[in-house]
Image (cartoon, grey):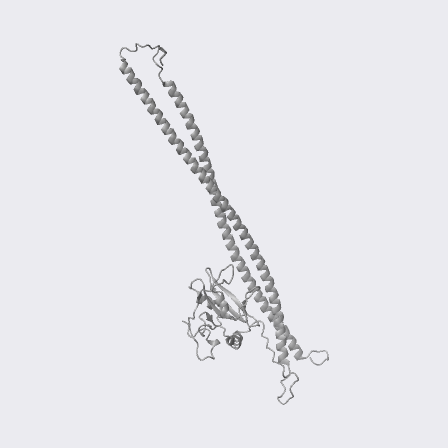
Amino acid sequence: MGEHPDDKTIEQIIEEETIAKAAKLAEQEAEELRRKEEEEIKLKMKEEQERLEKKLQEEEAEMKRKQEEAALYQSLKEARLAAEKLEAEKVKIEKEEKAKLAELKPPASNGFLSPGGYATCSYGDPFDTPDTSAKAQINQKQSEEKAKKMRERRSSELYMSFREARKKFEKMAEESGKVLEAEWEEQEKKAKEAEKDMREIARRAREEHRRSTMSLTHEVIDAFTHSLQQQSIADAPPVPDKNTAPSTNNNLPPTKKSRPPRPMCKNDVIEWFKNVERIKGSGIDPLTGKTAEWFHGVISRQDAEDLLRGQKVGTYLVRVSEKVWGYTISYKAIERCKHFLIDTLNDGTYQFFGSNQLVHKNLADMIEFHKTKPISGIGKELLLHPCKQKSDPPDYAELFQEEDRITTFL
């Protein structure tokens, strides 16, 4: 190498290998990040699908109950028809009884035939005195009147009871029909809303996946560009001596040094917090001027979940992220711990990762806002109970080690 004019120099070969290695490493990191984000999206979709399936099962059970009520309504209708049939039979029986009583009435003793077919006369039975015959007729008449009154009273009682039962059946059937109709309409409304939510979740997942893919592509390009810049800086000529004449643009304001897309290590995060965030007062309670109860240092996801284990729902902490230039809210939900990434924008504001997010002027305002406003519409996460420090010195000590005193909340 170096003997032929077309041969590359060792410096050129090393530079090309360095560029290729940087591009490959950036691509691997982007691929790993994309894979993790896809897994998180799939997990969210799976959880939402399980919730909707459970909801559909409950709705099916409710529908089954409504069908059973409809069957009961049909039974009530049949009972009403049976009552009407029984009333018709009662009227028929009363008519038959009246006809039989008319046949059993004895004819007057005026020479007509008796019930036995024999003619009667005024002489009568030699043992039947006029007083005895009159008394018997009076008793028979009283007995017939008494039986008639009993039949009429009983018939009236039965009629009233049947009519009352029919009214109750009709009222129950009418009320049951109204309830069933209202519940059916409500069930249809809920089913349509669930279907609409399902479509909206699928649309958001597709949009998030597309946006994540585009973001990763830009990050790969930025990482590659940053590697080239670092290499160019390393290969740049040495700084001229102080005696050298100044350049013509010496009076221009200094440009802001751009940061890489993501921190390379924990030390980068600590330096960034000291040089940028600590100056802005991030992690400080504006009311007391001390470190906020919810603030934690550069701790891992597992450490955050260990701190939240056993805490009540709504407990939260804010930790400095080691993956991005920002923070992570770790939140204790009903079923598990949730983690929300906070991005620090170039203009010094704060917002959650994703599109159409609210922008806050500082970290404390963002936390205060979500004490009354949920983080997401689905989860309804409210920041209710701050998770205080459990160690001494606190886990954020390395972020404030240059200060004279560190306030610890135990």
- Quadrant of the rendered image containing residue 357: bottom right
Measured from the top left, where is residue 288 in percent x and y?
44, 73
Q: Residue furthest bottom?
A: 243
Residue at x 60%, y 62% (from the top left corner):
210
Total numbered badges shown on the rendered structure = 0
Which of the two residues, 27 or 152, is positioned nearer the viewer here?
A: 152
Screen quadrant of the C terminus? bottom left
Q: Is residue 309 above or below residue 142?
A: below
Measured from the top left, where is residue 195 in percent x and y?
55, 52
Which of the two residues, 166 or 9, is positioned nearer the viewer here?
A: 166
Q: Is residue 227 above or below residue 79?
A: below
Tell me if 42 is positioned left or right of 286 in this view: right
Measured from the top left, where is residue 147 in percent x and y?
34, 24
Q: Is residue 97 above or below residue 171?
A: above
Residue at x 62%, y 68% (from the top left corner):
218
Residue at x 58%, y 69% (from the top left corner):
29
Residue 51 appears in the picture as rendered? yes
Tell me if 13 is positioned left or right of 142 in this view: right
Which of the two residues, 25 or 379, is positioned nearer the viewer here?
A: 379
Measured from the top left, where is residue 367 in percent x and y?
49, 67
Residue 320 appears in the picture as rendered? no
Screen quadrant of the N terminus? bottom right
Q: Residue furthest right?
A: 5
- Quadrant of the rendered image containing residue 219: bottom right
Residue at x 51%, y 52% (from the top left corner):
53
